Image (cartoon, rainbow, N blue to C red):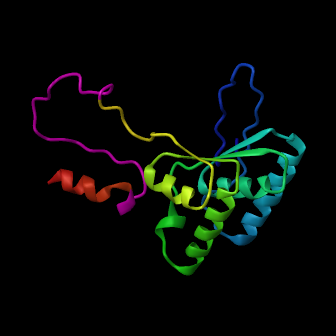
Amino acid sequence: VMAPGSGVAEPIKGVQYALLSLFDPESRSPFHVIKEVGEAGRMLKKLEPDVVVSFTPKANLISSWLGLRSNWKTMTVITGLGWMFTDTPWPYSFFRKLFLKVVSRGDRVVVQNMADYKLFIGEGASVKLIHGSGVDTERFKPLHERDHKLTALTFIGRCIIEKGIGDMIHLAD
């Protein structure tokens, strides 16, 4: 599993896996990315995995790139396309095209919304749509009626229009 951070995953009975946490999600330096590709390639060559599952755009791009030149299968999980798909200057459009071409050539892309599904299908990828990243409002309901009319809304994420900030502002009215 390739993802940024240093979280420790709970063991899964009967499954042997390694968590590779070598990516700096904040670094956009091409030299740093080249270094990360080399480190990931050396680690994966040593591990000889059957499948590499990746999360986050940078880990997805690197693992998919390495997967094209290896014997392991890749499963790229797209939980959100992030800055690469919201910023418009030329470097982002280049990385956007590179990301789509490389990730789409992998074994499986897993997405959580129809827009991403259509995007990757259009690139010829093997895509699985899993409806996720939401709240089941039938399961999670208020326990009781509140006696006041003030509603508190909490948002955790980047404050950009693609995250629904406009909808939240509209709800506040």
Q: Where residue 73 appears, x then y in whole percent?
A: 76, 44
Name the foreground residue: 145 vs 12: 12
Q: Is residue 172 magenta?
A: no
To which quarter of the image does residue 18 belong? top right
Which residue occupies the extreme top position in the image?
13
- What residue is drawn where x is 39% and y is 39%? 134
Asked if residue 144 lies left or right of residue 34, the reply is left
- Our reading of the magenta stretch's main secondary structure is loop
Q: Where residue 34 appears, x then y in whole percent?
A: 77, 66
To which quarter of the image does residue 46 belong? top right
Name the foreground residue: 26 vs 80: 80
Q: Where residue 128 appears, x then y in whole percent?
A: 56, 43
Q: Is residue 18 visible?
A: yes
Compared with residue 134, is residue 16 higher up or lower down, i.e. above or below?
Answer: above
Asked if residue 119 lies left or right of residue 62, the reply is left
Asked if residue 119 lies left or right of residue 162, the reply is right
Q: Where residue 54 appears, x then y in whole percent?
A: 66, 46
Name the foreground residue: 62 vs 116: 116
What span is colored magenta in the figure?
A: 138-162
- What residue is drawn where x is 82% and y is 39%? 49
